[in-house]
Image (spheres, rainbow, N blue to C red):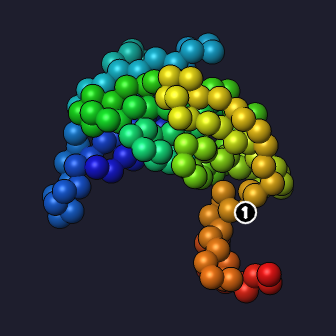
Amino acid sequence: MLVATTQRGLAFLDVTDPSAPSQIAFLWLRQTGHDWEAAVDDGSGPPWPGLSGGDAHRPAVGVGYSAVMAAGGDLLVIDVSEPASPQLAGWVPLDEPARSLRAAGQLVYSAGPPGHDEGAVYDVGSVEDPAWVGDHDVVEWVRGALVNDGWAFRARPSGLEVAWVER
């Protein structure tokens, strides 16, 4: 299964045969005040009249049988254990808009816009009750830096950066 973020929600695709992917379901999302509403269908059309596009950039990451997505100032947790019927399970307010997310176990790390050198950590182990658990200073890792055997790698718009990390 592949989960793709869109401006209006999440598309769930069956990629068992990569030459012929098919959409399993679409989870429509809409923010109403401080709450969220969700509806599942085949993606044929918005379930609510006048639904407009949402955030242009919605970072997401998979954690177990959940998809975790930043949208509208919140971190949303979607239960994807039944791909044909995904469910919005819970959400927690973000400290700041997230431009990147990274998961390690049941913890999700967020990184804000460029120039911010701290981010937040959220525990999504309880999908119905995700929680902020602290801050971090590893935003470059969240934004895409990987370290392997003393080498650091980071994808940038201008190309791939590679550096030796002194120990």
- In x, y percent, where is residue 138? 75, 58
Q: Nearer the viewer, residue 111 or 165?
A: 165
Question: From the viewer's perspective, is 7 left or right of 44?
Answer: right
For residue 149, side relative to residue 14 (left or right): right
Asked which secondary structure carries label 1, the reply is helix
Residue at the spot 56% in from the left edge and 35% down from the top edge:
124
Residue that mark 1 sits on: 140
Q: As drawn, is 98 to the left or to the right of 49?
A: right
- Front one among 123 and 9: 123
Q: Give the residue at x 65% y 29%.
A: 131
Question: Is 89 situated above or below 137?
Answer: above
Image quadrant assignment for residue 70:
top right
Graded by Cα atoms within 10 Å as few (under 14), some (14 to 19) or many (20 or more), the crowding at tag 1 reads some
Examine the image and state in which quarter residue 21 appears.
bottom left
Residue located 66% across and 83% down the image:
151
Q: Is residue 41 visible?
A: yes
Of 155 and 82, nearer the camera is 82
